[in-house]
Image (tube, helix red, strand yellow):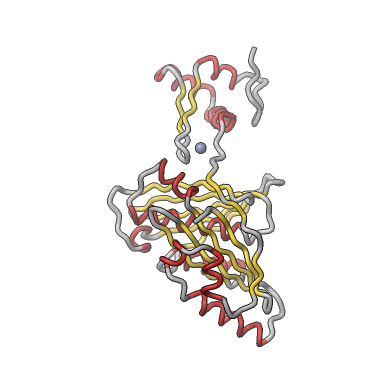
Amino acid sequence: MSDTLQRFLFEQAPVRGGCVQLAATWQAILERHDYPAPVRNLLGQMMAAAVLLSSTLKMKGRLSLQMRGDGPLKFMVVECTNGHFLRGIAQCDEVVPTSFIELMGQGSLVITLEPQESKERYQSIVNLTGDCLADALGDYLQRSEQLDTHLWLSADGQHAAGLLIQKLPANWTDEEQELWIRVKHLSETIKDQELLTLTQAEIIRRLYHEEDVRVFELEPVCFRCSCSRERVSNMMRSLGYDEIQTILAEQGGVHVACEFCNQKYSFDAVDVKQIFTDNAIDGASPTRH
Ligand SMILES: [Zn+2]
């Protein structure tokens, strides 16, 4: 099983699909954090979903999926770039229930798009509905984008995987409509174990062997954190000179760990001085004197 996304199209109707499988990418997340199994599995599902949803966007940039709730799972976020670089994190109690509804309690789903070329962010917030993440996302796409979309998501300690089908806007004929219903029924027969163990080619063959499916080239997916020393410096600037001086006085340095990848960043008094000099502009490395 590899870290890839397989896109496909049905030749006889405007229906597109995607199938993603994560192995090393998923392990890279699990190596850095230890989650109770229900939270781990949900995070894996969210990672798969983020790749599938970002593959349906024309936009170049970053998609993030976020859930917040008043249950034992407080917070979960996954980010995926159009180059399929993924990172994700969750915050939860030590002991958690297994069901999605009990995990999240009253919760909301936040979907944010950050196009590369603009400073604008597009954000939608909806109440969490359905009894699994796949249903909540399908529901959201149906209501907000009027896109009939269905997802199947699965994850365990080894793999995370997902399947998506989406009905594209078009003037649909009766035959095409029938094909959509058939594709939906066929897709519903996918089992978690198949998603997690079969290759995408096997899954597509297993589900749609009687349909005319066009598959595209496999696209690589991988874990990559977007944190950097520059970003941490910018964050320190936004906290302000006085705040940072207080930390420096108390702790002898400023030590920051990225919560996504655990990368540690340390700044001493000289570093801090440079960060707050006038030549230090956002996104640029501080100039050394
Ligand atoms: Zn990081």
Q: Is residue 222 left or right of residue 281?
A: left
Total marks shown come to 0
Q: Give the percent coordinates (x, y) of residue 170.
A: 71, 76
Q: Give the percent coordinates (x, y) of residue 128.
A: 45, 63
Q: Residue furthest bottom?
A: 174
Residue at 66% in and 86% down: 175
Please identify the quarter of the rendering in which residue 9 is found: bottom right
Q: Residue furthest top?
A: 289
Q: Is residue 192 left or right of residue 113?
A: left
Q: Give the percent coordinates (x, y) of residue 218.
A: 62, 58
Q: Is residue 106 left or right of residue 271?
A: left
Judge by depth and name the residue closer to the eye, 241 or 274. Answer: 274
- Where, quadrant-wise, is the C terminus in this rendering? top right
Q: Is residue 190 left or right of residue 54?
A: left
Residue at 39% in and 60% down: 106
Q: Give the percent coordinates (x, y) of residue 63.
A: 59, 52
Judge by depth and name the residue closer to the eye, 102 or 107. Answer: 102
Question: Relative to 289, is 239 above or below?
Answer: below
Question: Relative to 265, is 8 above or below?
Answer: below
